[in-house]
């Protein structure tokens, strides 16, 4: 703050950013020192003047003063008013602040008299994550990792940790060390991802450096020392070869195995020869750098990926042509075989065929539901959300619908624009969630851009 005098002049002239910067420096530059009364009055005045001009960071920092009692009497209600004021303008960090206050209620009994309000906290963190706020993203990861409010899903948690790490641009970010620690722990234990001790050590060392940086910067150690010690402990154990190698854990369960081996997934092999198939063999088109005949030979040997490739190619090529029942049956046969051989990606395509009745196939929403349920692509969560919203095949449940749409949107996979639109309608009409027209409008615009440009590009351009 070598230019403090210059900034004060700008602040006095009404510059909101200068007002915020001067106030922040007075209050937070050294949290271990008390604030001079005159300077404190100036800081509060500048924060309030910046807030009057719609400065979101000023809202959050003045809220933080009331939250922790920094220079003012602690008042969580005033803090919440300011946090909600920032949330109303969709300031990403506002949802992080609101989520933390509800997820960790110790000391906040005046706001939350009962227990940890994980449902509301999830809603705040979800909004923050959709707005690309890194801390909200990894806090959602924590909820999926531990199963707080949501169904436990370590793999999705790991994906969210990686997304948060992608959003962080430097070690100076408060979330940097914590996210690196979580990724390192996942690699160390083989939970949520394949065990990889080299990767674990890499991220744990990054976490150590991040925590050390926070210590040297003067951040309050009580908020992160446990994580710092955990990172050092695990890193030492890895280097001393004291971490057990875990066996690869299959995600196949009894219900899944029962489904793929059920009569529902048995599809009759078509009668040969099939004229369209014989023409393809002669044409022998190139598919993904391999010839059709080579892929077909691998499929006939029992490879699920090749089965899926053949099914996808044949179905898409002939679905719109007349007199194609034989080749469509051939494609469906290989779709079903691919599922039985463990190709979960094939499940989503096959589910969509039965849900919509593509190529004249008899619609079977019941079968489509189970195929969506066991598919490993997160866009399938969006389809499951529709089932729960409509009460089709399953009992109507708007909470489950919301959670399915949210998971699809958070995955940021291509084609999740439908889930974004459905979430927008829920926020627009107050279905399960509190009505929020501004956030609904944001989701609608995000959905429109995603449908045209692809989801990943849209999220990056936000």
Image (cartoon, rainbow, N blue to C red):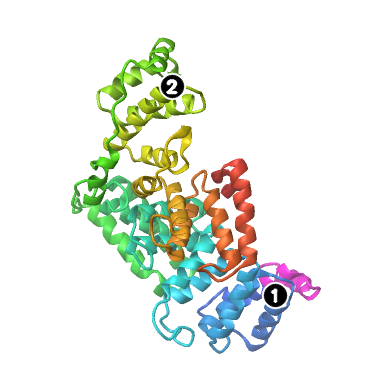
Q: Residue furthest right?
A: 13
Magenta-drawn segment: 1-21
Q: Is residue 262 left or right of residue 155?
A: left
Question: Is 444 a magenta residue?
Answer: no
- Quadrant location of the N terminus in the rendered image: bottom right
Label 2: element kind: strand
Residue 443 vs 50, above or below: the answer is above
Tell me which numbered mark, 2 or 1, is placed earlier along the sequence. Answer: 1
Q: Residues within 10 Å of mark 2 (few under 14, many from 20)?
A: some
User: Residue 270's x, y, as percent?
Assistant: 31, 24
User: Residue 183's x, y, as percent?
Assistant: 36, 54
User: Residue 67's x, y, as percent?
Assistant: 53, 81
* Residue at the image position 42 percent from the left and 12 percent from the top: 279
Q: Residue furthest top?
A: 282
User: Residue 303's x, y, as percent?
Assistant: 28, 28
Mark sitting on residue 51: 1
Label 1: element kind: helix
User: Residue 320 versus residue 188: which sits nearer the camera?
Assistant: 320
Q: Is residue 381 left or right of residue 145?
A: right
Quarter-of-image position of residue 178: bottom left
Q: Say if residue 42 shows up in the picture.
A: yes
* Residue at the image position 34 percent from the left and 64 percent from the top: 147
Mark sitting on residue 33: none
User: Residue 188 versus residue 9: which sits nearer the camera?
Assistant: 188
Quarter-of-image position of residue 345: top left
Mark 2 lies on residue:
287
User: Residue 103 versus residue 123: which sits nearer the camera?
Assistant: 123
What secondary structure prevails in the magenta region?
helix
Residue 272 vs 259, above or below: the answer is above
Question: Is 20 a magenta residue?
Answer: yes
User: Residue 312 versus residue 443: which sits nearer the camera?
Assistant: 312
Quarter-of-image position of residue 444: bottom right
């Amino acid at each position: 703050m070598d230019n403090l005098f210059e900034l004060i002049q700008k602040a006095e002239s009404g510059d909101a950013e200068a007002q915020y910067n001067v106030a922040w420096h007075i209050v937070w530059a050294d949290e271990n020192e008390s604030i001079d009364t005159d300077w404190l009055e100036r800081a509060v005045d500048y924060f309030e003047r910046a807030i009057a001009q719609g400065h979101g960071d000023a809202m959050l920092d003045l809220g933080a003063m009331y939250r922790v009692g920094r220079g003012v009497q602690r008042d969580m209600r005033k803090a919440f008013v300011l946090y909600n004021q920032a949330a109303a303008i969709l300031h990403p960090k506002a949802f992080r602040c609101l989520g933390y206050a509800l997820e960790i209620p110790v000391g906040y009994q005046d706001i939350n008299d009962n227990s940890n309000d994980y449902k509301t906290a999830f809603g705040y963190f979800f909004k923050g994550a959709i707005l690309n706020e890194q801390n909200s993203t990894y806090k959602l990861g924590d909820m999926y990792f531990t199963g707080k409010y949501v169904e436990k899903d370590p793999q999705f948690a790991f994906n969210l940790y990686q997304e948060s790490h992608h959003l962080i641009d430097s070690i100076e970010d408060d979330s940097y060390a914590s996210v690196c620690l979580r990724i390192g722990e996942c690699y160390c234990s083989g939970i949520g991802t394949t065990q990889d001790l080299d990767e674990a050590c890499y991220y744990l060392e990054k976490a150590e450096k991040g925590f050390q940086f926070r210590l040297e910067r003067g951040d309050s150690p009580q908020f992160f020392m446990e994580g710092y010690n955990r990172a050092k402990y695990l890193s030492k154990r890895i280097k001393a070869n004291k971490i057990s190698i875990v066996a690869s854990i299959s995600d196949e369960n009894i219900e899944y195995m029962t489904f793929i081996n059920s009569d529902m997934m048995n599809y009759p092999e078509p009668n040969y020869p099939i004229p369209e198939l014989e023409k393809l063999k002669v044409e022998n088109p190139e598919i993904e750098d391999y010839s059709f005949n080579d892929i077909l030979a691998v499929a006939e040997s029992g490879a699920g990926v090749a089965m899926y490739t053949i099914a996808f190619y044949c179905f898409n090529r002939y679905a719109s042509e007349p007199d194609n029942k034989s080749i469509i049956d051939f494609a469906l046969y290989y779709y079903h075989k691919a599922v039985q051989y463990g190709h979960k990606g094939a499940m989503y395509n096959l589910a969509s065929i039965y849900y919509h009745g593509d190529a004249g196939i008899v619609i079977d929403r019941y079968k489509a539901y189970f195929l969506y349920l066991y598919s490993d692509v997160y866009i399938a969560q969006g389809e499951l959300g529709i089932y729960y919203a409509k009460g089709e095949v399953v009992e109507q449940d708007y909470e489950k619908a919301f959670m399915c749409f949210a998971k699809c949107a958070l995955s940021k996979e291509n084609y999740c624009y439908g889930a974004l639109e459905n979430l927008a309608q829920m926020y627009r009409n107050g279905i399960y969630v509190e009505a929020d027209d501004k956030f609904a409008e944001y989701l609608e615009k995000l959905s429109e851009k995603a449908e045209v440009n692809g989801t990943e590009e849209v999220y990056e351009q936000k």
